[in-house]
Amino acid sequence: MEGETEGGWGGGAESVLNLVPGSSVPIRYHSLFGAHDDFLLLEADEALLPDILHSRVTIRGQTDEEAVLCTPSATYAMKFVGTSNSVFLIPPGEPIPPCMKDTCNDSKSNTSAVHEVVPSVIKVASGNMELVLVAPRLDKLKFLLNERPYKLDEDVETDFQHNRSLYRWQDLLEQIQASEQELRDGLKALSAAEIDGFWRIIDEKTMDEILNMVLNNSILHGWRLNALKEDEVVSILEADGYPRNITLHCLATFGNMVGSSGCSLWSLDEKKVCLHFALQALGGGKMKLEIFLQKWRHRVPSGMHADLKMLEGEVLYEKLGFETWIRAFRVSALPSTPAERFAALFRERPRWNWKDLEPYIRDLHVPGLSSEGLLIKYTRRSQPRADVEPIFSAR
């Protein structure tokens, strides 16, 4: 500040900040003292200061949502915390001309030589905004992308409206309450792909059609499912009318890129492929376990082995007399917030044993709360005897 070195500053925030513990200083209302509802104080952890000071944070939320603050990699709920003590906002003091400072130094008793400087309160804060680390709110992302899944034949539809219910990266950033990194992770978890600049979920029929084309061609051309040559697979499917980017997305969804020498190789993931055909065999209905296993194993590609352990968090079993029935119940279709997740689970079943419940809550991550803490908060545990498996019901 100009003149600060020569003359210094009198009164204002500096007078309060330099107070010796146990001492006091008079204060007064500033001439601009007025309403207090046009500002909020933000309390932030020191680790967050670099992001805040370098404008790497964004406040996100629609008018009907509670606002969150997002850094490049994390999401924080913003909660107002009131205080019973008055918090004064005091602006910097006014500069003291050098001549007045010298006069004061020459004659400390001559108080008329300098004007009296008293800290002035310009605002009073009734509390502050507190930041609490929370999980990203990604259920809306799932809803938006499911409005219009990508279909192979959609480009030839005569009534195709290119921008209706389609979302670019910036659109999602503005709509979803999550950091950029959390949003990328959410898109990956949904197996979303960027097509013509829009993020899309590929509809199940299209994914099934392309996967079966890959498997059929592997038989025709003698491809190994753990060493598929990317260029060869893409070239052959393109000749059959399948877009290159959709074929690559299918390979990434059902497989993993493996080490290669001179060309990109893909290995189909046994669990992902078997899960796909398990859900297809169930067809959205309920059937006897024995019949399901026959259908499932018949659909699984040669060389892959179907195992019921692959279906954790994807199906539920039900005992009816001496028979076991099975039906689809996917964790990916459940809400991501703990309260809504447990409510959905207990609507499905009023009582759960741990073996059945665990696959449906293992993906819940609440900062500062362990899995045991989630169970204590949202469930009631009953265990008549130590040798009996505990049962969980709604709290």
Image (tube, rainbow, N blue to C red):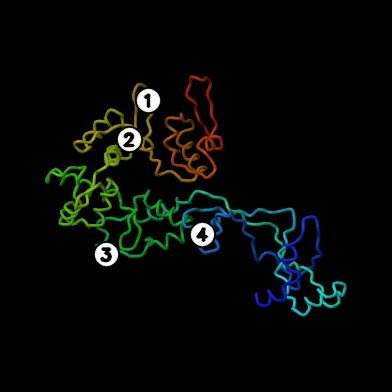
Circle nearer the N terminus (2, 3): 3
Circle nearer the N terminus (4, 1): 4
Which residue lies at the image location 15% right of the left edge and 57% below the top edge?
239
Q: Are marks 4 and 1 in contact (CB under 8 Å)?
A: no
> Residue 291 bears which disc, if any?
none
Circle nearer the N terminus (2, 4): 4
Q: Are marks 4 and 3 in contact (CB under 8 Å)?
A: no
> Residue 320 bears which disc, if any?
1
Residue that mark 3 sits on: 158
- SS at circle 4: strand
Q: Are marks 2 and 4 in contact (CB under 8 Å)?
A: no
Q: Are marks 1 and 3 in contact (CB under 8 Å)?
A: no
Which residue lies at the image location 25% right of the left edge and 35% below the top edge?
296
Q: Residue furthest bottom?
A: 99
Which residue lies at the image location 73% right of the left edge and 62% below the top edge?
18
Residue that mark 4 sits on: 60
Q: Amino acid at mark 4?
A: Arg
> Residue 310 bears which disc, if any?
2
Count of labels in the image: 4
The crowd level at tag 3 (other Cα within 10 Å; few <14, some 14-19, many 20+) is few
Q: Amino acid at mark 1?
A: Leu
Q: Amino acid at mark 2?
A: Met
